Image (cartoon, rainbow, N blue to C red):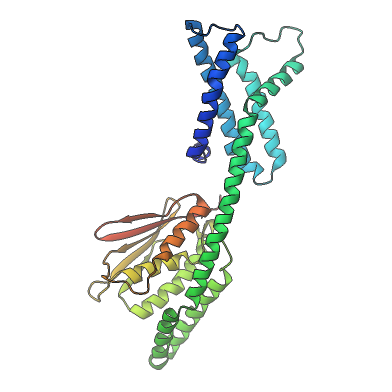
Amino acid sequence: MRKIFSRIKKTDWQIIAIYYAFIYPLVYVTNSLSGRHELISWEGLKWLGIYFFDFSLDVVVLTLVVFWIFHDYYQQKRYGLAFVLIILIIIILTFLHPILVPAMYDFAPQEGANWLIWTFEGIENNFASIVGLCLFLIGKQHYESKNQIMQLQKEMKESELQLLRAQIDPHFLFNNLNILDILINLDPKKASRYTKRLSSLYRYMIRHKDQDVVSLKEEWQFSEDYIYLLEQRFDELFLFENELQGIDLDSYFIPPASMQTLLENIVKHNFALPEEPIHAIIYLEHDFLCVKNDRKLKENVKDSTGTGLTNLKKRIQLLTDQTVAIEQTEETFTVKVPLVKLV
């Protein structure tokens, strides 16, 4: 139930509140004019409470239909099951309604009455009481979903361009070729391993550049190649500790090359010395991929547009409806990236 309510946005609550703020007094006045109760009286106050409880039941049904059935079944094209669940909920409400709000009924089916007709009339009344607002909220969800997809496509295009730029970044390529040239003379076997790692990294970026997400296992294999290149370049100035062992990484998903952004952020913004290396820990915490590093900021950061982490935040928010959390103290800097979990 908590998951269902988490899908309800502030604007949804506002629409529901405005709708019932209009319907609530309208029903009260209409029933007063029809003779059910006086407009201003103690009896009228009692009916105000009854109407409030009745509308609360409608909101519960509305929530189940729009934010559970439509979200989990209709949008997944399981139309038959969605229809059956909606009818089932309305039938249950039809039979519970006279028990929960008996004062709303001027009559009850007497012995020998046609229960089938009474049931269908109840279903019709309960359906009619929520259908208008349901359709409005479903339309709103559909519009927002389409808009979110368009926004995601835009962000993915920007991310793809950034990834392509990273593939041909002259500084990145120049640094790696320099190291490779040195290794060829000093240690040919190590140079061969370095070349394989470098080609594996580029192969990964090219293969996954059009994908929204990849498994965390694949992303971590890519990260190991990237960390290897960083370690060869900076020797022991940056030390990376992996605490992902024993976790089923295949059940988590993340945008491709996210780890490159996080690791690159550490190297680009921090100043390391042989006697004071930068330590970084990669771990999982409550379905969040966390990267925590020592914080020793450089005074000036060259070749930084500041778009890497910002772009990752946008992609993650569009994919998961969650935000990348950043926690920083004087000594540490932590980025927590929400993962898409395979249920």
Q: Is residue 146 left or right of residue 232?
A: right
Question: Compared with residue 338, is residue 278 higher up or lower down, i.e. above or below?
Answer: below
Name the spot of residue 102 as percent of width and height, x first. 59, 12
Residue 245 visible, this angle: no
Name the one closer to the observer, 30 or 166. Answer: 30
Name the spot of residue 147 as percent of width and height, x first. 58, 51
Question: Compared with residue 164, is residue 29 higher up or lower down, i.e. above or below?
Answer: above
- Residue lying farthest bottom? 185
Name the spot of residue 223 as percent of width and height, x first. 45, 69
Q: Residue at x 73, y 16 (%)?
A: 118
Q: Residue at x 67, y 34 (%)?
A: 85
Question: Compared with residue 184, is residue 193 higher up or lower down, i.e. above or below?
Answer: above
Name the one closer to the observer, 85 or 150. Answer: 150
Q: Residue at x 35, y 63 (%)?
A: 281
Query: Which quarter of the picture shows residue 122?
Result: top right
Residue 108 visible, this angle: yes
Name the one closer to the observer, 114 or 46. Answer: 46
